[in-house]
Image (spheres, grey):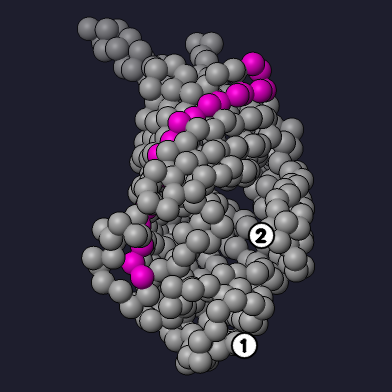
Amino acid sequence: MKLSIFLFFSLICSCAIAQTIQEFVIQGNKKTKSSYIHMLVELRIGQQVDSVLMERDMVRLIRETGIAHAYYQVSNDGLTTKVVYGVEENFTIIPSFNFFTTDEDEVAYRIGVAEFNGLGRGLGVGILYQRDIFDSYAINFRAPALFNRKLGLFASYQNLTTEEPVFFDNTTANYKYNNRSVELTGLYQFNLKHRVEAGFSLFKEDYQYIEGATNPVVPLALVADKSLLKGIYEYDNVKVYYQYFSGWRSNFNLQYVHSTSIDLPDFVIWRNDLTYFKRLGERGNWASRLRVGFATNDDTPFAPFAVDNNLNIRGVGNIIDRGTGVVVLNTEYRRTLIDKGWFVLQGNAFVDAGTWRNPAGDLSDLYNQENVRVYPGLGFRLMHKRIFNAVLRVDYGVGITPGGTRGLVFGIGQYF
């Protein structure tokens, strides 16, 4: 009897020991520091094997800019339980070069370089120069896990100058617009699904009239010192497997802007992007984004929301109008046509639809047919699976609502 009890408890103890992690190994990382990976993940030596925890760690690692894919392995030789976390790294020093034409048929270009995994610890640093009639430049630093797994920092400086259309009295004027700003923002991640940002920015806006319509109440020159407070909350339950996405994401952005100019009054602006991804078969991916945003409804030609090719509706043109409210739905089907090692060719069919509220207008503006734009189209993506965000995007959209236009839109990264 005593022997049976002894054997029973011995069996229980041996099973418990076998499931306790005695060895934990990181493999596959060449640039990313093992110490950084250990800081990011929850698994520790001495814990019990927990597949739910390890799956969470895989999601956390795959979201790192320096990591393309991650996996885990558990082995037991009867005496020792060993866990291996394997990673496939991205190449993260990315040069960028874009060129396009302006309304004056002048060639404009944007060049830059960014490092997304600085020091092998997920530090992001980028510099940018743009020549688009005028010179612009920017530099930024982002470190989501600078202090620990949850707490990070973002900082930036920019001096951007563009030619911007301003809309009033059913006419348009072109202004030289300059924005010089510095920003500092704290980043905090509660867990894999919930994170927040809080920060401030100090900037100066300078509008100088170039050509077009005029109005006595619309100044030809306007300079304002501004300050901005912002908060961001993001819910992220999206799983990523190379070019495929599945799940929900919601990003809510709230800002308060204080101005020293009566022509550019204080305002509050908020925007929420709700994004949904679903795998369809082995090679298909359906993606949709609903963007809803509103700002203080001032009667100003400098309204904050722009209707633009690169922001919300592909093919519509470059900043064709502005408003104090916007509702946009983008939906597309992505189909992997070629997947050979590092290279992926993806085709897509999309529909972009949006509307906006005019400055000092009513909510009824949102369903006024003059403000509604619907643009279906086709496009393709050229992707490198081992270079972070190496997605060359080309889309062609055609307007099917009154006054519709058509056009090509080029970009880096998926549209959303």
Relative placement, left or right, of 12 versus 415 is left
Residue 55 visible to the viewer = no
Q: Quadrant of residue 223?
A: bottom right
Which residue is label 2 attached to? 103
Instruction: Say few, some or many: other residues with alpha carbon within 10 Å of mark 2 (under 14 / 14 to 19 / 20 or more).
Output: few
Classify 301 as above or below 365. below
Relative placement, left or right, of 208 versus 361 is right
Q: Nearer the viewer, residue 270 or 328?
A: 328
Residue 362, which numbered label? Answer: none
Q: Which amino acid does the dot numbered 2 rest on?
A: Asp
Indicate the position of residue 47 as horizontal and vertical percent values. Answer: 45, 33
Classify 198 as above or below 207. above
Look at discs 2 and 1 and give the one toward the viewer: 2
Which residue: 75% across, 68% down? 134
Instruction: Say few, some or many: other residues with alpha carbon within 10 Å of mark 1 (under 14 / 14 to 19 / 20 or more).
Output: few
Q: Earlier in the sequence, mark 2 or mark 1?
A: 2
Q: Which residues are magenta?
A: 340-358
Which residue: 64% across, 16% down? 340
Q: Nearer the viewer, residue 255 or 216?
A: 216
Which residue is label 1 attached to? 221
Q: Which amino acid does the dot numbered 1 rest on?
A: Ala
Numbered disc 2: secondary structure: loop
Residue 350 falls within the magenta-colored stretch:
yes
Residue 232 falls within the magenta-colored stretch:
no
Indicate the position of residue 229 as horizontal and vertical percent values. Answer: 47, 76
Indicate the position of residue 154 as horizontal and vertical percent values. Answer: 60, 63
